[in-house]
Amino acid sequence: MRHWQRMADLGTAVAVLVAALLTTSTAHHLRDPVAAGLAALACAPLVVRRRRPYPALLVSTVGAEGYLAWVHGGGGTLILAAPLIALYTVAETGTRRRSLVIAAAVVLLIGVFHTAVKSGRWLGAENLALAALGGLAVAAGEASRNRRAYEAEALLRAQERVTAERLRIARDLHDSVGHHLALINVQAGVAAHVLPNEPTPQRETLDQIRQSARSALDELRDAVGLLRRPDEPLAPVEPTVGLAGLDDLLATFERAGLRISCRREQDRPLPPAVDVVAYRVVQESLTNARKHAGQVEVRVVLRFRGPALSIVVENDGPPAPVGPESHGLTGMRERVTALGGSLTAGPRPLGGFRVSCRLPTEAAA
């Protein structure tokens, strides 16, 4: 792409140079090395105008004015196309205010030169045409810059949508599939523990189920790690299952061995996004408790405090291991933060683990 741009800029410079020389009225000027050198000085900066727009504009303007002064009375006004093209590039690459200031300075400089050298009028036809062409160059540069900015913004929005979709897939994979795989692993372990006298084939089958579930969880963790990146922006949530399914969720974990006490104070309808995030926070907290603490007692409390829903899930058991935050906790924190809430999670002083979450309900609605 850059090669073609350089070739196009070179072709533009050559075309302006040839046109300026051919429109010079006398053959003497065509053979004059000074005139040819000044014309080349005006057109040569067009080759590097994209990389050095301001020096290119300055040199092109000086060269064009020098050429017109040297061939005074001999035409060659097409040489002014060179600084106008450079002015277009300045407007395309710079800011609007800077472009207008520079355009006014260039047009004023050329107008003063024409008026002084050719003894013309300030509001003569040449100066008016020059002002119009300068404004047209700036307007074209502005239009090109705005178009590129619009295309870049559209590309950024598309990338953000892809990132949001990837994060949603990562969270749903871990929350849904990981939840059920963890329960399969736990249930197989419980079955092998309570059926110690079963024949060897049955125990081997249970062991294979546990190993397969563990392998699937490891592969899921790797897949989530690929989908989720630590420097990605927050993504919105999408409603799926809410607190209406909380009783079924608690019953599932109770069958897995957890002893759960749940207290819901001042129950009231929630906005869909808050409903989903609240369910996911409880689900992930219970999954982590069963996975890391075993068959322990878990207390779940949901209460409204002003315009916010407070969720606390804590469990007894041995001190929780300290290590990097899991994908589940990362997903919970992303969902809560996306709604303007806060979440803290960590070991309890006397053992076990505690997750505390605050979700604003009015802002989410």
Image (cartoon, rainbow, N blue to C red):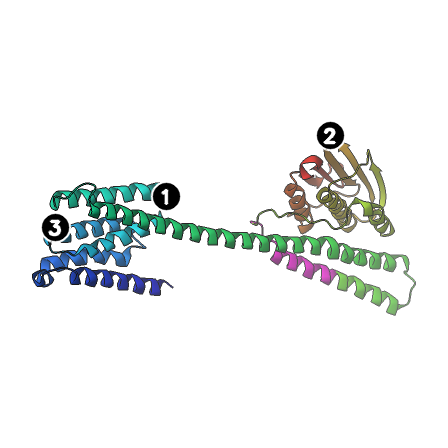
50 and 32: which is toward the camera: 32
Label 3 sits on what residue type?
Ala
336 and 107: which is toward the camera: 107
Q: What's the CA distance linking mark 3 and mark 1?
A: 31 Å
Instruction: Return the x and y of residue 129 as percentages of the image width and height.
Output: 24, 48
Disc 1 marks which residue?
A: 96
> Is residue 226 shown in magenta?
yes
294 and 272: which is toward the camera: 272
Label 1 sits on what residue type?
Arg
Disc 2 marks which residue?
A: 306
Task: Please report the bounds of the magenta region as a residue range.
Answer: 214-231
Disc 3 marks which residue?
A: 69
Q: In the visual, does 177 lie left or right of 69?
A: right
Q: Quadrant of the C terminus?
A: top right
Q: Are the residues flagged by discs 1 and 2 in contact, CB closer than 8 Å?
A: no
Asked where in the image residue 358 lies, by quadrant, the reply is top right
The residue that appears at 77% across and 58% down in the rendered structure is: 181
Secondary-structure class at tag 3 = helix
